[in-house]
Amino acid sequence: MIVTVVIVHIIWKKNYDSLEKRYVVGEVQRIVPAWGQDPKVEFSFTIYGKNHRELSPRSIYHPKAGEFYIVEVPIRDIKKSKILLDIPTSGPIDFPWEGWEKIPEFIIEDNQ
């Protein structure tokens, strides 16, 4: 059973890593409790002029509603977007309509 879970995770990660991605700024909307599991972070972001809401695992982080973070957006499968809770921003930041190709240096420098 554990071997199957590990294999599925490796295949999923390899597939996810191969997707072309863009980076945008997203806002935490709320923390969704999950009985017996790690809570989820509901977040919103805009790319290509469309607003999106998705869920990501909270993991070891403790974000609060209204905080802003970088969101990694797979272009061909936006539903797989994930909020990068280890890369907060000081607030909403203007970004290109189609997102950044990589996380800007000024954001990385602010988080070191």
Image: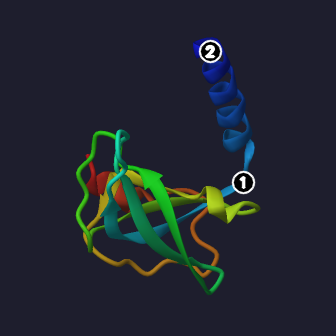
First along the sequence among labels 2 and 1: 2
Instruction: Classify mark 1: helix, strand or loop.
Output: loop
Q: Quadrant of residue 28?
A: bottom left
- Expressed as whole percent of the image width and height from the top left, the position of residue 11 reads 72, 29
Residue sitting at 32 percent across and 55 percent down?
Answer: 33
Relative vertical location of residue 31 with respect to residue 45 in this rendering, above or below = above
On the picture, is 61 further left or further right than 82? left
Residue found 35% across the figure and 39% down from its top: 36
* Count of numbered circles in the view: 2
C-alpha distance separating marks 2 and 1: 31 Å
In this rendered view, identify the residue nearer to me: 1 or 22.
Answer: 1
Q: Position of residue 61 (x, y in %)?
A: 27, 46
Q: Picture coordinates of residue 17 (x, y %)?
A: 67, 40
Task: Residue at 76% x, 62% y: name it.
Answer: 76
- The residue closer to the viewer here, 63 or 99, is 63
Taking the image as shown, residue 24 lies to the left or right of residue 85, namely right
Q: Which residue is mark 2?
A: 1
Q: Residue furthest front?
A: 35
Q: Quadrant of residue 7?
A: top right
Q: Between residues 11 and 18, which one lies in front from this camera angle?
A: 11
Q: Amino acid at mark 2?
A: Met
| Mark 2 nearby-residue class (10 Å; few <14, some 14–19, many ≥20) | few
Secondary element type, mark 2: loop
Q: Looking at the image, is 85 positioned above or below residue 24?
A: above
Is residue 20 rendered to the left or right of residue 85?
right
The residue where tag 1 is placed is: 20
Q: Residue at x 66, y 26 (%)?
A: 10
Image-based side of 2 in relation to 43, left or right: right
Residue 59 is marked as none
**Which amino acid type is marked by label 1?**
Glu
How crowded is the residue under tag 1: few (<14 C-alpha within 10 Å), some, or many (20+)? few
